[in-house]
Image (cartoon, rainbow, N blue to C red):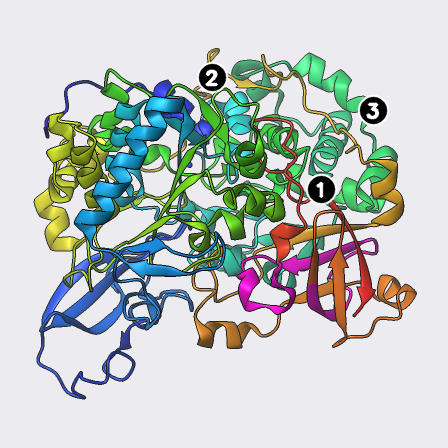
Amino acid sequence: MSKKKEKITRRKFVNQAAKGYASVQLASVLPVSLPDTVDEGTTYHGVCYHDCPDSCSWKVTVQDDKVISFGADKENPFTAGKLCGKMETFPRDITYHPDRLLTPLKRVGKKGEGKFEPINWDQAISELGDQLKDVISRHGSESVLSHGYMGTQSLVQKSAMSSRFFARMEASEIAHTICGGAVVPAIFEVNGTSMGVLPEDMQHSRYIILWGTNTKHSNMHQWPYALKAREAGARIIVVDPFVSATAEEADWHIQPLPGTDVALALGMMHVIIKENMVDQEYIDQYTSGFKDLKEHVKSYDPTSVSQICGLPENDIIKLAHEYATTEPSLIRIMVGMEHNYNGGDGTRAVAILPALTGAWRKLGGGLMHLTFEMAGHALNWERLEYHKQMPTQPKRSLNMVQIGQILNNRELNPAIQAIFIFNSNPMATTPNANLTKRGLEREDLLTVVLEHFMTETAKYADYIFPATTQLEHWDIADSWGQVYVNINQPAISPRGEARPNSEFFRLLAKEMDYTEECFQESDKDMVKSAFDSDHPYLEGIDFEYMQNHGWARYKIPEPYLPHAKGNFATTSGKCEFISQQNGLPSYKEVVYSEEEKINFPLQLLTVKKTKGFHNSSHANVRHLRQKEGRPWLDIHPSDAKARNISSGDEVIVYNQRGKVFLEAKVRESIRPGVVCMPHGYWPSLIKGGQASNHLTDDRLTDIGGGAALQDCRVEVEKG
């Protein structure tokens, strides 16, 4: 099972990805039975499992099957011996949390009431198998939906065994589009790859545009490289519609209206081309479509763009000048700009800029985006995604952004009759939550949830199975934000009756009479097989090495200048300004109904502003919630005055989908006509029982079927 039989093509990997991709001593915070002083214990290597670009390495020391110390790996230069605040007390907050689910549960009340009784594993698996077979016999395998996502980014417990199970069943699969759904395919249309400037090479940049990314807050191990560049003379520019923690530290904050990034980028192109600040030699050799682009951007003059973006004309001109004339210039994007209708074209337009100016020629110049392709090249992906080699495959893919519509749509052929939810909490993390709630309330919907806690979603389950945490199972983690690979060793025995996700699917496969050999492969063997690769990026890095070191940096050629001489991974081999699928990028005004425009005059931004939560993870941890305080709404003084609202007032934010109770913070961190609230709070733990995604719309982006979350209109009134 461990041998690599064939090379996976780069295009195949890219297409698959585009579908969707402090040391703290714990004796005082873990169970009181732990002594104040302990023996040295045994130390294990691990990695943070969160869907985060940093993918931090850690070490955990265990004595008598209990954690006695836990902290960041000080030897990993990227992790740099520091975990984020939400993870410093991870063992206490998650693994040893008193509310953790430690036995299988069967529903005894109405869906959503959260009333369950314990059931043993054998009985639960037997009952579930019988019910699942009945669903398939009556409605077909496509009536079963697999809803796994990035609750763990680590590859084995995320999907290695579950994907085999659902491929064998030929179930429906969920399209992972809510994050990266627009930005990834869009950037592939331009460059054919998401790879660009390496994270560490930001220190060589002299003009850094952090576009739609709150780097200091949500990519904390990248921020020091920006500061190193600044110490060497670089300027840091932030483009963001609200004043983030990063914007507060920037040399210049440019604050366009939400969703207008594409117009700003095209306006920069207008100035750069008109004033002949392009690298014509680079354009002629390594790009296609310049003639048409040159004509296209004539209509995006500074005056027109100023009106679209709400920015001074001089700022647009100044940004274009500084970007085009300072070397090396770097644009850093993540996924922030994609969450609006123009998200795909915004990404494409920004991705074109480095080729126009020839920024790719110099170390630290170009575009920095996602790094997940490193793993696609280096690791034995055929073993990690063995399900794609199976003779049976999922027959249809359904967009997770619109899970509420999917569950309520009886016209689907077949309609969804069973759903498996793991590594995901859609009631808190996907838009139009009240519609999702209505779907999960269906008594005829067989709902299975694998979880650590009684989440908003788990309350609607028929069966809940307790999952292990990262301290209790084998795994391997790639990264979409840096160039290290990590191994995760089980440090303690699973608590209670918790079992890995992979083991749940092995047991259910047996119950379903799936006898294929692939369902017998152990987690450790899957981790081992990932390093069965002869790619030069893994030279000298095998399973034994990882066992001893825990992490490794891919053996990347230095200096890494991927597009200094073109070498784009498009069909033409050039940076393609004109997409074969979507033409030239352009700004398109979002269409709202007259009722929305009249009744809900404010645009709502829902952003990751909390420090203690990761999406909805950790939001049930009391001390982290206390640090965050009551959920709040940023509102501009002019909008607050018109509604007689002062800072500290309770306000109700509402639209046709829901209403949320928040505390007003009147300040100029947001523009007039725009309000902003944090994402991640569990609805059941705040007043009113509704949170950000009870307001957001499930409309899709222009490219890739992503989530246009920020195209949401609301009204605010004093509570």
- The foreground one among 25 and 216 is 25
Residue 556 seen anywhere in this rendered image of the structure: no
If you read the primary sequence from the N terminus, does the residue marked by circle 2 or circle 1 appear first? Answer: 2
The quadrant where residue 712 appears: top right
Residues at badges 3 and 2 in contact (C-beta under 8 Å)?
no
Q: Amino acid at mark 3?
A: Ser
Q: Residue 461 at what x, y percent from top left?
A: 41, 49
Q: Which residues are magenta?
A: 661-690
Residues at badges 2 and 1 in contact (C-beta under 8 Å)?
no
Q: Residue 586 at what x, y percent from top left?
A: 72, 25
Residues at badges 1 and 3 in contact (C-beta under 8 Å)?
no
Q: Is residue 63 above or below residue 633?
A: below
Disc number at residue 77?
A: none
Q: CA distance from mark 2 to mark 1?
A: 31 Å
Between disc 2 and disc 1, the foreground one is 1
If you read the primary sequence from the N terminus, does the residue marked by circle 1 or circle 3 appear first? Answer: 3
Q: Residue 318 at what x, y percent from top left?
A: 76, 44
The residue that mark 2 highlights is: 570
The residue that mark 1 highlights is: 711
Crowding at dot 3, Cα within 10 Å, few <14 / some 14-19 / many 20+, comes out as some
Q: Is residue 333 magenta?
A: no
Disc number at residue 299?
A: 3
Q: Who's the residue at 63% across and 55% down the image?
A: 692
Q: Amino acid at mark 1?
A: Asp
Q: Is residue 141 left or right of residue 369?
A: left
Q: Is residue 235 left or right of residue 118?
A: right
Q: CA distance from mark 1 to mark 3?
A: 24 Å
